[in-house]
Image (tube, coloured by chain):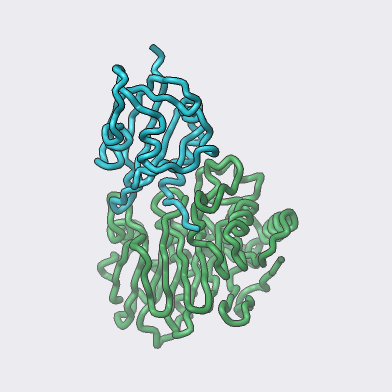
Amino acid sequence: MHVALWGTRGSLGSPGAETARYGGNTSCVEVRGPNGTALVLDAGTGIRRLGAALPRSLRRVDVLLTHLHMDHIQGLGFFAPLYNSEIEVHIWGPASTTLHLRNRLMRYLSPPLFPVRLRELPCQLVLHEVPCGDFDIGEFHISALLIGHPGPTVGYRIATLQATLAYMPDHEPALGVRQFPLSREWTSGYAVAADVDLLIHDAQYSSQEYPSHIGWGHSSLPQALAFAALADVKQFVPFHHDPAHTDEDLDRLIAEATAAVRPVFTVTPGTEGAIFDLGVAEKATHASTAPVRRSLS
Amino acid sequence: MSQKEIEEILMRQLASCLAMPIFIVDPQGTLIFYNEPAEMILGLRFDETGEMPLAEWATVFTPRDQRGTPLPPQDLPLTIAVNGRRPAHGDFYIRGLDLVLRHIEVTAFPLIGQADRNLGAVALFWEVNT
């Protein structure tokens, strides 16, 4: 399983010299299977570059949205396959209790927020509502489970015969918990992350910042580390970095939090351009156009 | 190990933060949590009772009407809420696990998640001071 990070920032695109190393694009992750099946996790601003890099021979791509907050769909209208009539684009995402996924997406993909309407897209568009039980896309077996974040939000567990990935970019499992974590059974997202090879998880805040953001739907880095330990993951990628955190801030916060708990799993800070090849010799490499990835254990 | 549904988790977290006694059951009616204020009325800490099937919790507290007649499990508000998927209210007497007889009022409502998923029910209850 090939995993590439095209956007790692949370909440708001944050380009600039001070964020150039970890990246300023919002959530977008590419997942490719051994047989070539292409998944895209979330459609943040990172999806534009991903769309431009997909092979021309591709005839189907599946976009899996965790939820419909703007930083996770803002790039959708700039995803090149949507404008190619020869490509099937399947979009998976949560409905709300009152609106279908199509109606929810139309709120963004229509004037005045966007000039092109959803129904005008030339691609062969198919929408799927989650959670809908487990499902298969090509060689991937996928589970979508509701997790703790304001509004309908799912985490995705994606498995091949060789490897398993969990993706929860926006998640606040510590909400309302006096001493986090509780048992596995009572922890939001545990079933998504249990024993995975790679966990990509929300780590937006520092411990100092979290108390003034309780209920906003995000985790502090120490909470995310505790969640990863509870789930017995092999590798953890802190993700959805706060837009106010500079590269230097992230270096310091991740180093401090990791040193404090000395995790038994690998911690690889979410960096735009990072690549993980799971199920082979598990290692992270890096795209040539992006900065050097850091790995802490 | 399996994980509870997110709505059940959030309900437990909310219950843990509230001062009202709250009792949560799953779709089968199994008691899955009660909070600290409920412990004061039921007479035992949840950590000591743990999860409890409907047939057990519906009788262990020996619910009775004011004449002392035992109430069948299917007539309890929480059972009505979980089986009938509708709110229910009632008042009756229970004997807590500390053996104290208490007069309580109960309001129960079903927990229905997205896609019409039946996730159990919740009871709010309080002691009637007469």
Q: Is residue A82 above or below residue B112?
A: below
The image position of residue A16, as x and y in percent, is: 61, 63
Shown colour of chain B: cyan
Q: In this view, does B128 lie above or below A111?
A: above
Side of A24 relative to A256 (left or right): left
The image position of residue A255, as x and y in percent, is: 73, 59
Q: Residue at x 53, y 75 (%)?
A: A163
Residue A119: quarter of image: bottom left
Q: Report whether residue B90 is seen.
A: yes
Q: Quadrant of the C terminus of chain A?
A: bottom right
Q: Nearer the viewer, residue A232 or A10?
A: A232
Q: Is residue A104 above or below residue A295?
A: above
Residue most toward the top? B130
The image position of residue A64, as x and y in percent, is: 41, 67
Q: Which of A114 and B23 is in front in this view?
A: B23
Residue A113: quarter of image: bottom left
Q: Nearer the viewer, residue B49 or A16?
A: B49
Shown colour of chain A: green
Q: Report whether residue A252 is seen.
A: no
Q: Which residue is drawn at 47% across and 23% down?
A: B99
Q: Residue at x 55, y 42 (%)?
A: A177
Q: Which residue is drawn at 52% across and 51% down?
A: A187
Q: How many labels does the image show?
A: 0
The image position of residue B16, as x and y in percent, is: 50, 36
